Amino acid sequence: MKKFPNTLMTSVAMVAALALAPGMAQAAGTLAGSTITNTASLNFQVGGISQTAQSASNSVVVDRKVNMTLVNVGATTTVSPGQTAAATTWTLTNTSNDTLDFALSAVNQTTGATAQHGGTDAYDVSNIKYYVDTNANGVYDPGTDTQVTWIDELAPDTAKTIFVVSDTPLAATNAQVSGLVLTATAEAGGAAATQGAVLTATAGANTAGVDTVFADGAGTADAANDGKISAKGDYTVAAAVLSVNKYATLISDPINGTTNPKMIPGAVVEYCIAVSNAAGAATATGLSVADPLPATVTYSASTVFLNATVSGSTCSAGTAGSDATNYNAGTTTVSGTLSNVAAGASTGLRFRVTIN
Amino acid sequence: MRKMLAKTLLAVVAAGVAMPALAAEKLPAIALLNEQQQDKVVEENGLKRHVLVTPAKVVPGDHMVYSLSYKSNLSVPLTNVELTDPIPAGTALEDDGTGAYDVSVDGGKTWGKLSALSVSDGKGASRAAQAGDVTNLRWVIPQIAPGGSGKVSFRAVVK
């Protein structure tokens, strides 16, 4: 058969889908409020003649089983000291058999507590806000993702990506960790854009209505079967840890030349301003250095080199600067901007002066 | 949870009590009672045991036991008795009762023991049927003696 290959493919696919349907696993299960009815029928004969069949049935209404998971997504959120609106990412999944609202509450961990990614909580973030991943790309997009105070109408077996956004204080230092605990509390759903009441497990005997049964696991800061789920997330500060050193190397003097020069008037000295960034620190960007020269020395024209190689206490090589840019004769200041310095790397600015 | 008990047997019993003089054939020839219970695990002194209770707070994952009782009201034998029960929507059969009943995986069109049935695996081939694939149950009782009674049951889990 050569005709209608597309139609054939479609029908094959449909058959496959239909065949899968009965065995499909549903985490949330039969929806709360559904009625499960069992009807049995009995056919029989008397004296070889079929009689009217008997049937009997009974029903049970499925109650609300509250269950959900909350996980912190990905690695720790890297922040700079003073960074505002840094997001940590979480996924809240409703595995209940009912549509629910969820209240959100994120609190700082106490100092010294172990954070999500193994660090120790050392500072607190502030200005905590909650956003949902409106465009479902898993990344916090300021201006696109919607700020919320609770999660509205999360259907069974669906998940929402939640961003907890906060500010890191300027005083935070490199490698410090701030831990958060986010708690989601199950609330009654059913009315869109209206936050439902916090659910409570139906105490005592079964009631005629839809009862509530808590089946959630224990979270970081909550017990099992309490209608709450909590999980940790954290921020880690990545700051540049810079050290600046100034080294002087005697190049020559008017009497001895470059052989064993002495520090006498007229001698040429090369200064090396070395900038180093510690291992494990964030890359330092936007570096600029300035060195106002004392009155006892005179800048040697066209001797500024930027991004010099630093080795021990000496600078070498580098890119030639220009006196117009890098030397201010009025203030006798040598200055320059340097390229970014990665963790564990260094750079330098070198220039020469003559001793007056 | 709302419970709607089958009224079938109750009505039969009431009729039988109120009108004892009526001829047996005025009663339903056979009374059928459909009961449901919930299999709950209770823990006492660190030991877990199962108890069957009146369904209460039924949620997905709970285990139900359905029991079907029948009693003949006739003074003649009933023959070719066939008791059928579709698996209640929203539940899945847990086991085949070690072959105590016939099952159908196609809505009651064909019947057999679970171990002998197969279902499509969704990839063009077929695989052995499992309890969760069962759609209908059937008990075939060749004959029920006058006044005879019996009880069958099956277990289902709330999906």
Image (cartoon, coloured by chain):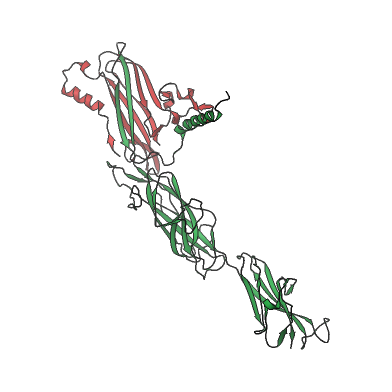
Q: Is residue A320 above or below residue B28?
A: below
Name the quadrant of the N terminus of chain B: top left
Front residue of this view, candidates B16 and A42? A42
Residue A230 image position (x, y, % from top left): 43, 54
Task: Please tell me which residue is depicted at 40% across the width and 40% down the height of the picture.
Answer: B48
Name the quadrant of the C terminus of chain B: top left
Q: Is residue B123 visible?
A: no
Write down the quadrant of residue B146 in the picture: top left
Task: Please tell me which residue is depicted at 42% across the width and 45% down the height of the picture.
Answer: A95
Residue B15 image position (x, y, % from top left): 19, 23
Residue A262 image position (x, y, % from top left): 79, 85
Front residue of this view, candidates B99 and A353? A353
Q: Tell me the colour chain A is drawn in.
A: green
Front residue of this view, candidates A201 and A38? A38
Q: Is residue B31 visible?
A: yes
Count of marks placed on residues: 0
Q: Is residue A220 above or below residue B68?
A: below
Q: Which chain is red?
A: B
Q: Is residue B12 above or below residue A136?
A: above
| Residue reaching furthest to the top | A47
Residue B80 image position (x, y, % from top left): 34, 15
Front residue of this view, candidates A264 and B36? A264
